[in-house]
Amino acid sequence: MAQYVYPAVFHPDAEEGGFFVSFPDLPGCMTEGNDMGEALFMAQDAMEMWLAHAEDTGQPIPAPGPAPQVEVPEFVNFVRADTYAWRKKNDSRAVKKTLSIPNWLNTRAEEAGVNFSQILQDALKERLHLT
């Protein structure tokens, strides 16, 4: 789990707009975005996913090479990846939380067959505007 910086080649799509992004040093790592902002976001996410997988499976991680020479309208931009932060954001494993509610509410909820975990997840997603 580390931080990395690699050169990415941005290939503009003149007909449809947007960008196709490839990483010369990371075989098979590529993505695309509808505009520059989305392409940069997707490039970081794709690179973090590629590198996290390599770390998890013990595959060698290539050293970043120099910025490749490209022809206009293509261009090179360096993209930073943090596999630790990516894992934290994308880890869907369950974690146990201890909480307190009034006994009368617990009794009523149990009688109604309430799934406490699901209710808490739904409430947190709503509160954090994630739904």
Image (cartoon, rainbow, N blue to C red):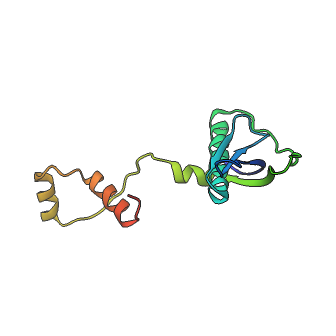
Residue 50 higher or lower than 74, as above or below: above
Instruction: Specify the farthest residue to the front.
Output: 15
Q: Please tell me which residue is depicted at 60% across the width and 55% down the height of the picture.
A: 85
Residue 41 higher or lower than 54, as above or below: below
In which quadrant of the rendered view does residue 104 lie? bottom left
Whether residue 4 appears in this view of the structure is yes
Q: How far from the left and from the top, in percent, is residue 99?
A: 30, 62
In which quadrant of the rendered view does residue 38 lie? bottom right
Q: How far from the left and from the top, in percent, is residue 22?
A: 73, 43
Q: Quadrant of the C terminus?
A: bottom left
| Front position in the image: 4 or 45 | 45
For this view, does 1 lie left or right of residue 107?
right
| Front position in the image: 15 or 120 | 15
| Front position in the image: 102 or 46 | 46
Residue 55 higher or lower than 40, as above or below: above
In which quadrant of the rendered view does residue 26 lie? top right
Whether residue 83 appears in this view of the structure is no
| Front position in the image: 67 or 84 | 67
Q: Please tell me which residue is depicted at 67% across the width and 37% down the height of the picture.
A: 54
For this view, does 107 lie left or right of residue 26?
left
Q: Please tell me which residue is depicted at 87% across the width and 45% down the height of the picture.
A: 68
Q: How many marks?
A: 0
Q: How far from the left and from the top, in percent, is residue 79?
A: 74, 54
Q: How far from the left and from the top, in percent, is residue 96?
A: 37, 52
